[in-house]
């Protein structure tokens, strides 16, 4: 009995699939509709994935970020020089030949025109101490050299240099009360520092009349396990009023709001466009059933059961959707993966450079969505085909 049922499924499905070229117009509409949904949904979700990667790549559990107590970001924080020295000497901070691997930093916003549009955008200029290059140990200079302490020199992240005009090595820019010279370009594994411009914090402070103020301290610890002791030492010190977090947790928190918003938009777009693709699939499959009314009725009269008819219609719908999903995923990957752009980082109100990231899970998600659209689009026509009255169908022209 089971073998007979599967034989019927194979026979009816084979006939359905062989007749697809006869309905190439409607079938092509379904494939294109599904492919369009998959392209757009993968593109939007790849933005969220790219932003998440940019904010969290390179962030380490053995690096601590110290802010003023109650601050959610560096923009709202403030630390005095004495406090930064106490933090650098706290237990658990890694020591090197030059002293503690700790960098007290200042964060300001400067204007630069976008290369693509020419409109001004907010770009972060970060003043750092020499140990910053050891704290962010994945950072490396790929063009030019590091800035020299005490000089009006800057190095730019590769993401910022690619998105904003004026950051080519050798260029001169004026911000605050100084004229700055671009002396290098650096990479940081695609992480947040690549969206920034770095300089000596001792030069940045007077340029913006910040006195001896800092906003944060980044400290490299002996190990991830040293964090609790480091945090406890600072939070119980009566001379300090600080908030201590792991670097990876700090940037993961910052990424949630922005990536969450992008994903909500992605879901909305996918649902709206997916509804259109489902209607296209419904139209295609209803047309297919209508064109084969007498054929289906004949099969039923010969003893074919309703189940194989349902499966055959669904198989055709799923195949068309799968083809559309694969095409859409391929187009999305080759068109968007690695595409460099920038968006506003709501935590700092400055531009965040990132690359679209079309990952294998996103491709799999797109194909699953296409199959879901095919299933919904083929289900009702399949039920209609199975319920056709045999006698009535045989009388139709």
Image (tube, grey):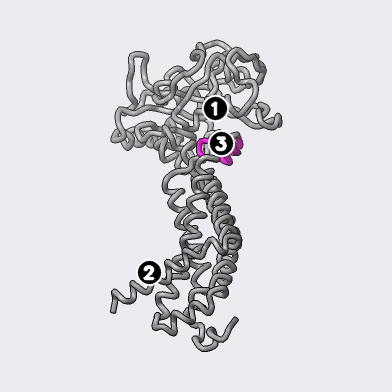
Label ID, residue 196: 1
**Which is closer to the viewer, label 3 or label 1?**
1
Residue at 34% from the left image edge and 36% from the top image edge: 232
Residue designated by label 2 = 10
The residue carrying pointer 3 sits among few (fewer than 14), some (14 to 19) or many (20 or more) residues within 10 Å by Cα, namely some
Q: Secondary structure at mark 2?
A: helix
**Which is closer to the viewer, label 3 or label 2?**
2
- Of residues 50 and 286, the one nearer the viewer is 286
Q: CA distance from mark 2 to mark 1?
A: 60 Å
- Mark 3 or mark 2, earlier in chain: 2
Magenta-drawn stretch contains 337: yes
> Viewed as shown, does residue 58 lie left or right of 215?
left
Q: Is residue 62 above or below residue 299?
A: above
Residue at 48% from the left image edge and 38% from the top image edge: 69
Label ID, residue 76: 3
Q: Position of residue 307 (x, y in %)?
A: 40, 77
What is the quadrant of the N terminus in the image?
A: bottom left
Residue at 42% from the left image edge and 35% from the top image edge: 247
Q: Are marks 3 and 1 in contact (CB under 8 Å)?
A: no
Q: Which residues are magenta?
A: 336-350
Magenta-drawn stretch contains 168: no
The residue carrying pointer 1 sits among few (fewer than 14), some (14 to 19) or many (20 or more) residues within 10 Å by Cα, namely many
Residue at 53% from the left image edge and 45% from the top image edge: 331
């Amino acid at each position: 009995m089971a073998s007979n049922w599967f034989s019927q499924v194979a026979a009816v499905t084979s006939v359905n699939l062989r007749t697809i070229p006869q309905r190439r117009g409607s079938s092509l509409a379904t494939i294109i509709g599904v492919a369009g949904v998959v392209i757009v949904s993968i593109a939007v979700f790849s933005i969220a994935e790219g932003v998440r990667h940019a904010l969290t790549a390179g962030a380490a559990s053995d690096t601590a970020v110290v802010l003023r107590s109650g601050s959610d970001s560096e923009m709202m924080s403030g630390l005095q020089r004495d406090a930064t020295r106490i933090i650098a000497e706290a237990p658990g901070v890694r020591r090197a030949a030059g002293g503690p691997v700790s960098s007290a930093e200042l964060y300001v916003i400067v204007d630069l025109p976008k290369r693509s549009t020419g409109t001004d955008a907010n770009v972060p200029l970060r003043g750092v101490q020499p140990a910053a290059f050891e704290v962010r140990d994945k950072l490396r200079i790929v063009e030019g050299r590091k800035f020299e302490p005490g000089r009006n020199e800057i190095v730019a992240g590769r993401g910022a240099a690619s998105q904003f005009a004026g950051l080519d090595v050798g260029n001169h820019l004026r911000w605050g009360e100084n004229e700055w010279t671009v002396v290098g370009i650096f990479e940081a594994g695609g992480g947040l520092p690549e969206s920034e411009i770095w300089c000596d914090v001792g030069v940045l402070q007077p340029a913006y009349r910040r006195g001896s103020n800092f906003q944060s301290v980044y400290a490299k610890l002996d190990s991830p396990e040293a964090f609790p002791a480091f945090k406890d030492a600072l939070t119980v010190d009566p001379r300090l009023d600080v908030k201590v977090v792991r670097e990876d947790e700090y940037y993961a928190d910052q990424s949630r709001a922005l990536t969450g918003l992008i994903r909500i938009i992605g879901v909305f777009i996918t649902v709206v466009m997916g509804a259109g693709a489902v209607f296209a699939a419904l139209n295609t499959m209803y047309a297919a059933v209508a064109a084969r009314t007498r054929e289906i009725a004949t099969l039923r009269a010969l003893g074919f059961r309703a189940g194989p008819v349902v499966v055959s219609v669904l198989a055709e719908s799923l195949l068309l959707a799968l083809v559309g999903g694969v095409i859409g995923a391929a187009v999305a990957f080759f068109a968007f993966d690695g595409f460099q752009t920038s968006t506003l980082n709501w935590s700092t109100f400055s531009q965040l450079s990132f690359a679209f990231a079309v990952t294998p899970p996103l491709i799999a998600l797109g194909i699953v969505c296409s199959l879901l659209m095919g299933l919904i689009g083929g289900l009702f026509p399949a039920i209609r085909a199975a319920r056709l009255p045999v006698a009535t169908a045989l009388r139709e022209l």
